[in-house]
Amino acid sequence: MIVLEYKLKGKEYQYKAIDDAIRTSQFIRNKALRYWMDHKGEKINQYTLNKYCAILAKEFPFAAELNSMARQSSSERAWSSIARFFDNCKKQVKGKKGYPKFKKNSRSVEYKTSGWKLDPKTKKHITFTDKKGIGRLKLVGSRDIYFYNPKDIKRVRLVRRADGYYAQFCVSVDVKIDSSLTKNMIGLDVGLNYFYSDSEGNQVENPRFYRKAEKQLNLANRKKSKKYVKSKKPQSNNYHKARMRYARKHLRVSRQRNEFAKKIAYCVIKSNDFVAYEDLNVKNMIKNRKLAKSISDAGWTIFRNWLEYFGMKYGKVTVAVPPQYTSQDCSNCGARIKKSLSTRTHKCTECGFLEDRDINAAKMILIKALRTVGHTGTYAWGDLPSWAIAYGLSSNGGSVNQESPAIPTSGG
């Protein structure tokens, strides 16, 4: 499954119709979630919520205007959050289990195989045929979709972003590509000083996209705040314009981060047959208020998602190893040399081995990964690779020809 993304060009009334469809999709999802909450004693499943969509369509005229399969897709989003909560409870995940919450600001609506139609000749336009009145929209981007059969398009998702509206096509194709073996193995240690250090002694500079744009972001945020009115009256048009300018700057930073991680991950996978990295819990790491901004700016999770996706695509082995003591253990003799975070050089008191702290950690990561040879290719530290569960990987992509994995039945 790949996702092809195009920017949409239309008229103002069409954009308002898309907004109406998104609001309706959010309404149906929240109603399905409320139905599950009110009937906890009964056996509620995904099919029950799909049937409930038909009841909502009869009760609310605006819900009937949305395509029936789009309504089912909204209920599937609700069930996805419910199933995730049950799965976390079954696995006894520490901390909060992710109890389903109501959506307040949805930004997408998803159609299945009906409710839309591509231009049969040029495939440069898409027409939505439900009663929301979206109509015919122009697709701006590469012509990659021209090479795929419309029957292979399983979902079409309309996404609203700060810089406009986009259409994402989920195409059911085999993305696996045979590639020649390089006979290289590598361990990666991500960090803040360098984006990553590998076991070969190479280091990639951390681009720090947010840090570089922080001054402009703060300025735009102050301009937005000055136009905010602390009253019950609706905000002015100037406030909303300033808000969108601020959002576009943030969107640009996130796109830069994603494209950088994608490019680096592609190079790593194409150059090696075996890639090892740390199984970091970034969610817990950003609780450190002193390092949260820098960790978020580094984009380690995005990088890992792309590594695992390209590994699956090109038939390369990617292994995540526990991060415990990778910076403390000596990669030469295995002795544990404790050192603070400020100590950037590894010097073993047992064997006298001297190496950069991050490079030593990368070598130790590779050693640990090779010990888990029984798990290679199976993603030892999770039932699924992270690209298979991180549904929104492409939603922050910058290019309109964004190839990424997708699980159509899950939603945000």
Image (spheres, grey):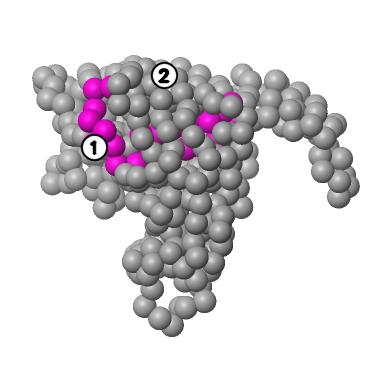
Q: Is residue 251 left or right of residue 168?
A: right
Q: Is residue 160 magenta?
A: yes
Q: Amino acid at mark 1?
A: Lys
**Residue appearing at x 41%, y 54% in the figure:** 68
Observer-nearest of 249 and 8: 8
Residue under label 1? 151
Q: Is residue 338 left or right of residue 385?
A: right
Q: Which residues are magenta?
A: 145-169
Mark 1 lies on a secondary structure that is: helix
Residue 330 makes an appearance in the image: no
Determine whether 91 is above or below 130 in the image: below
**Residue appearing at x 49%, y 62% in the figure:** 57
Question: Alpha-carbon distance for marks 2 and 1?
Answer: 21 Å
Residue under label 2? 141
Q: Amino acid at mark 2?
A: Gly
Q: Quadrant of the N terminus?
A: top left
Task: Pinpoint residue 129: horizontal percent, then vertical percent.
Answer: 43, 41
